[in-house]
Image (cartoon, helix red, strand yellow):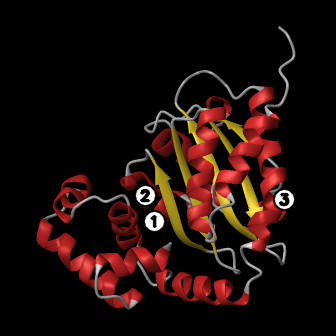
Amino acid sequence: MPHQEIPWKQIYDLSLQCCKYRSTKSFSVSLLREMNRLVPFDEAVVFYLNGNLKITDYYLYNINPKWMSLYLGYYSNADRGAYGLVQRDLDNLDGVYVHQWSFEQSGEVIPDYIRPRNLVSTLGFPMRDATDRIRTIFALDRLSDAPYTDWEIETVRSIRELLKLFHRLLFTCADDEAAQLTSRTELQTLTPREMEIVNLLEQGITPANIAHILHITVPTTNRHIYNIYKKVNVNSRAELMAKIK
């Protein structure tokens, strides 16, 4: 099989597109969208961490929100925390890594969480802030038997290397940092269910459809939305979207 060259022209075009944004969330969502054209994946999640390595927000691509609620609420701590974002793992998490789930065994997480999601492989990588703390973690999932190839892994590694400095710079502007810390602190007060609803609202889904997706009543959904507004100190959906971008 002939050797495939790294697609530098597409990577440079990708970086120009992503570097238009000045918030970590907008940047990472753009990066997901652009990467999927070069290295296809079926599902993805981006985790946003605070300076204490706690998940304060996340963005889901093609994943049912119930799975993230189950992960954050239980499976991230199951099997003695083997599949959680704990300190010892984060200390060693650099570069690009791949999990082939068909080769993994565990007490609960694999049979009860990974298998029902039909996950076959996950390609992931972190990005750090200006003080070298991990602040964003990408996980790109495949449901097909086609493994990530060496070319795809190297392509993602090249994308990360090109954009990691820009990601650091997102945290160096004092005004931007203060705004992000304020919104992240407020988001930390949200429950996993409320975080699910925020992500669905961000995708433009109506409260009625959110209720259907989460299998709860519309009044319960509206009560959650009211509590979200109160915790994040906003009065409308538009204000909430502006605050979390």
- Whether residue 174 sits left or right of residue 8 in the image: it is left
Residue situated in front as seen by the camera: 57 or 170? 170
Is residue 39 among the parts visible in the rendering? no
Alpha carbon of mark 1 to alpha carbon of mark 3: how far? 24 Å
Q: Alpha-carbon neighbours of circle 2 within 10 Å: few (<14), some, or many (≥20)?
A: some
Q: Mark 1 or mark 3, which has the lower sequence index?
A: 1
Residue type of the residue flagged with mark 1: Gly
Task: Using a 10 Å C-alpha cutoff, classify the residue at mark 3 as few (fewer than 14 neighbours), some (14 to 19) or many (20 or more).
Answer: few
Q: Amino acid at mark 2?
A: Leu
Number of numbered discs: 3
Q: Which residue is mark 3?
A: 92
Which tag, 2 or 3, sits closer to the chain's start? 2
Secondary structure of the residue carrying tag 1 is helix
Tell me where residue 38 appears, x and y as whole percent.
66, 33
Above or below, 13 relative to 171: above
Residue positioned 69% across, 60% down in the render: 19
Q: Position of residue 107 (x, y in %)?
A: 57, 46
Left or right relative to 125: residue 42: left
Residue carrying label 1: 73
* Alpha carbon separation for disc pair 2 and 1: 5 Å
Q: What residue sits right under mark 2 in the picture?
A: 70
- Badge 1 crowding class, 10 Å Cα cut-off, few under 14, some 14 to 19, many 20 or more, is some
Q: Position of residue 92 (x, y in %)?
A: 84, 59
Q: Secondary structure at mark 3?
A: helix
Q: Find residue 236 and report its image quarter.
A: bottom left
Tags 2 and 1 touching, CB below 8 Å? yes
